[in-house]
Amino acid sequence: MAERIWTTRKKWLGNLVPILCFLPLAIIAGAIMLKARGITTPGVVIFAVAVIVGWLAVNQFGLMGNENLRERLQRKLLAKAMKNTTAGIFVGFARPAYIGLLDAHEDLGFLFLEGDHLEYRGEQYNVSLHRFEIKEVRFRPNIHTYLGLGRWVSIEAIVANKPVRVLVEPRQANTLLANRRRGSELKGRLEKWLLEKERARV
């Protein structure tokens, strides 16, 4: 069995650095207020700085090792499948039922728009949807949303009379905010691709 690339250790790394950036200042703020036996201005200010530093660290380091992950997954997933490694959009993926405590992304892989169908090819999952099965593309929240740093691009389809939802979030860039902007671009690209289906019917 091939060694997994997107591991629990990799997920931990994206959390560890932001925690280490936030925690010392938060501890100092707590110590100041504990010593004063109440809420103090210096304590509140230092804690606010801790939150800002933590937020910046999540944005900057939350995708630690992202470029290396992308290159390794390109070699593992796409070369063997005879896929054009530059055509796929590098994304995080999750099933609707997935609850990730360490990372919003259950799986990593590549999204392809190929003529009349969409394909996700990942390390754990492969999904293919015909264009006529897809009914809507919309944003849905994930854990990054509550920090103002990201969101799912939700591809919503009906397959064999059953609702199917494919949740992806771009990882093309190495910071969360940059990928949030890429999410808007991906949603627009998917909507344009779906419009081609409507024009074909006319």
Image (cartoon, helix red, strand yellow):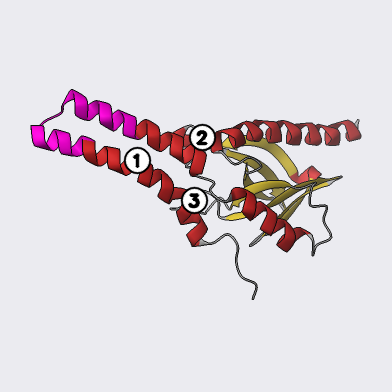
Q: CA distance from mark 3 to mark 2?
A: 13 Å
Position of residue 142 in the picture relative to residue 111 (left or right) = left
Position of residue 152 measured from the top left corner of the image (x, y, whole percent)? 58, 40
Name the residue at the top extreme. Answer: 41
The label nearer to you, 1 versus 3, is: 1
Q: CA distance from mark 1 to mark 3?
A: 18 Å
Q: CA distance from mark 1 to mark 2?
A: 17 Å
Give the magenta range. Answer: 29-50
**Can you tell which mark lies on residue 22?**
1
Three-letter amino acid code of the residue under disc 1: Phe
Residue 165 visible within the image: no
The residue that disc 2 covers is 149
Instruction: From the viewer's side, name the closer residue of 37 and 93.
Output: 37
Q: Mark 3 or mark 1, which is nearer the start of the sequence?
A: 1
Three-letter amino acid code of the residue under disc 2: Leu
Residue 117 visible within the image: yes
Secondary structure of residue under mark 2: loop
Q: Residues within 10 Å of mark 1 (few under 14, many from 20)?
A: many
The residue that disc 3 covers is 103
Q: Residues within 10 Å of mark 3 (few under 14, many from 20)?
A: many
Position of residue 199 measured from the top left corner of the image (x, y, whole percent)? 88, 31
Instruction: From the viewer's side, name the closer residue of 64 and 127.
Output: 64
Name the residue at the bottom extreme. Answer: 1
Residue at the (29%, 42%) spot, across then down: 24
Residue at the (80%, 36%) spot, across then down: 193
